[in-house]
Image (cartoon, rainbow, N blue to C red):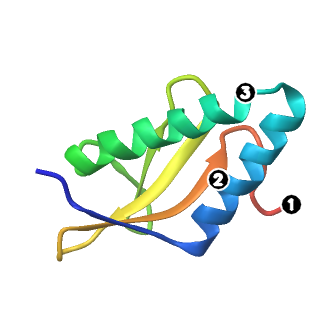
Amino acid sequence: MKYQIIYHTDAENDIRKNKKWYKEQQAGLEKRFSLAVKETISYISVNPLLFEVKYRNTRVAFTKIFPFGVHYQFDNNNKIIILTILHTSKNPLV
């Protein structure tokens, strides 16, 4: 069963910002990044409880190729809220 997915504004901005960065590094790389994120979110949509809660009812699923974690919450109304897409080696507060 697939669940409704809602993107927080931060997640949309993270995807857009990182796609731009990858495009500047190598032509076409932004498409591979976007696909990796979409595949991860698709996997979450089928198995939202597969990943453990890391903090404040937030779960993290990692992309296979790129070093990013998709931070999301699964609520009681069967909605998946994508909160942010963060690089695993960067401090999100900087």
Question: How far from the left and from the top, in percent, is residue 88?
Answer: 66, 39
Instruction: Determine which residue is flagged by label 2.
Output: 15
Of marks 3 and 1, the one in the foreground: 3
Determine whether, in the image, residue 68 is placed left or right of residue 48: right
| Residues at circles 2 and 1 in contact by the CB criterion of under 8 Å | no
Q: Secondary structure at mark 1?
A: loop
- The image quadrant of residue 82 is bottom left
Classify 60 as above or below 76: above
Residue type at numbered disc 3: Gly
Instruction: Determine which residue is flagged by label 1.
Output: 94
From mark 3 to mark 2, how far is it between C-alphas? 15 Å
Mark 3 is surrounded, within 10 Å at the Cα level, by few (under 14), some (14 to 19) or many (20 or more) other residues, namely: few
Q: Secondary structure at mark 2?
A: helix
Q: Secondary structure at mark 3?
A: loop
Q: Nearer the viewer, residue 84 or 15?
A: 15
Classify 93 as above or below 53: below
Q: Residue at x 79, y 63 (%)?
A: 93
From mark 3 to mark 1, how far is it between C-alphas? 28 Å
Question: How far from the left and from the top, in percent, is residue 62?
Answer: 49, 36
Label 3 or label 1, whichever comes before in sequence order = 3
